Image (cartoon, rainbow, N blue to C red):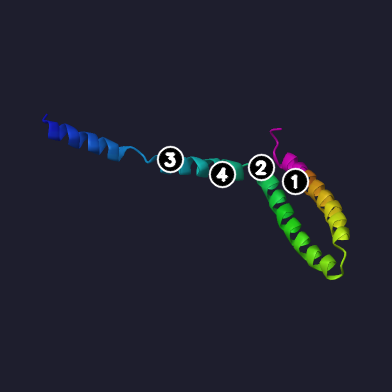
């Protein structure tokens, strides 16, 4: 083999190697697929997503309401109590649902 052929063979080998970014992306997608196909983690994600959306909507609407009537300190207290109660309820509910669906634990 000549040096040119050796260089061409090296270039072909490099071209066959998978891209590191593509391999990392495929690994992430595979991990997400495993998490979503497991009923336990799927319900925990759904519960946390519901909690996040409700907290956002709750905080936005209450800020407008209490600032309009001039009671921002009342808003802080009500927001704390509601987020605490809603967060505990959502997480405990998602955990109970996940335990019922995942028979392995």
Q: Does residue 103 belong to the magenta stretch?
A: yes
Give the residue number, with chain letter if any, for mark 3.
23
Q: Is residue 46 above or below residue 61?
A: above
Q: Does residue 65 belong to the magenta stretch?
A: no
The span picked out in magenta is 95-105
Q: Residues within 10 Å of mark 1 (few under 14, many from 20)?
A: many
Quadrant containing the N terminus in the rendered view: top left
Label for residue 41?
A: 2
Label for residue 94?
A: 1
Q: Cα distance, mark 4 to mark 2?
A: 10 Å
Seen from the viewer's position, the closer of residues 37 and 22 is 22
Q: Along the polypeptide, which appears first: circle 2 or circle 3?
A: 3
Residue 35 is left or right of residue 24, and the answer is right
Give the residue number, with chain letter if any, for mark 4.
32
Q: Along the polypeptide, which appears first: circle 3 or circle 4?
A: 3
Label for residue 30?
A: none
Labels 3 & 1 near each other (Cβ < 8 A)? no
């Amino acid at each position: 083999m000549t040096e040119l052929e050796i260089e061409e063979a090296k270039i072909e080998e490099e071209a066959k190697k998978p891209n590191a970014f593509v391999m990392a992306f495929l690994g992430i997608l595979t991990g997400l697929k495993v998490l979503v196909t497991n009923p336990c983690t799927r319900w925990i994600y759904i519960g946390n997503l519901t909690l996040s959306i409700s907290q956002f909507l709750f905080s936005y609407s209450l800020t407008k309401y209490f600032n309009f009537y001039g009671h921002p300190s009342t808003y802080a207290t009500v927001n704390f109590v509601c987020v605490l109660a809603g967060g505990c309820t959502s997480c405990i509910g998602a955990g109970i649902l996940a335990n019922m669906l995942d028979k392995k634990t």
